Image (cartoon, rainbow, N blue to C red):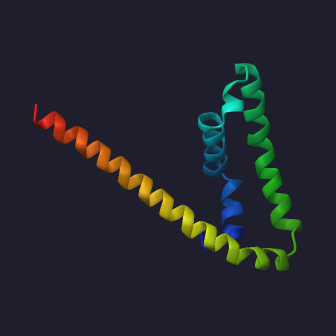
């Protein structure tokens, strides 16, 4: 996903890719969600899948442009930090995989 502004990011959150990212993070990383029953998880996931695009519509159409302009520098700073974190995590994953491959080759 590439984004150049907070509005692009908010728009992306309302797409299938954005919704699936939110749902994946929720289902994989949030302990209280994992503790729920299967049926409750399904209901929450459906609600998010329907509500998130509607929330994005409301935000993009009813939040004043001036508000987005005020938030933009903060978004850019956070985005750089997240991009750096993602790069570090990806590098660590590649390094770990490489170690396993090299260990397997040396057996």
Image quadrant where residue 99 sits: top left
Q: Is residue 107 above or below residue 72?
A: above
Of 48 and 107, the residue lying toward us: 107
In the rendered image, residue 73, in percent from the top left (x then y), is placed at 68, 78
**Count of picture labels:** 0
Q: Residue furthest left?
A: 106
Image quadrant where residue 26 sits: top right
Image quadrant where residue 42 sits: top right
Residue drawn at (40%, 53%) of the image: 90
In the rendered image, residue 2, in percent from the top left (x then y), is placed at 54, 65
Of 15 and 3, the residue lying toward us: 3
As drawn, is 96 to the left or to the right of 77?
Answer: left
Q: Is residue 20 above or below residue 57?
A: above
Residue drawn at (25%, 46%) of the image: 98
Of 105 and 51, the residue lying toward us: 105
Residue drawn at (32%, 49%) of the image: 94
In the rendered image, residue 55, in percent from the top left (x then y), is placed at 82, 53
Residue drawn at (81%, 45%) of the image: 51
Image quarter hosting the C terminus: top left
As drawn, is 60 to the left or to the right of 15?
Answer: right
In the rendered image, residue 104, in percent from the top left (x then y), is placed at 17, 34
Image quarter hosting the N terminus: bottom right
Q: Is residue 17 above or below residue 75?
A: above
């Amino acid at each position: 996903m590439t984004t150049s502004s907070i509005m692009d990011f908010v728009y992306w959150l309302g797409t299938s890719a954005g919704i699936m990212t939110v749902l994946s993070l929720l289902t994989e990383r949030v302990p209280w969600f994992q503790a729920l029953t299967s049926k409750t998880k399904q209901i929450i996931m459906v609600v998010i899948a329907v509500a998130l695009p509607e929330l994005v519509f409301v935000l993009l159409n009813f939040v004043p442009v001036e508000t987005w302009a005020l938030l933009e520098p903060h978004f850019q700073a956070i985005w750089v930090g997240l991009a750096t974190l993602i790069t570090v995590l990806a590098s660590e994953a590649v390094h770990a995989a490489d170690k396993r491959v090299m260990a397997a080759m040396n057996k």
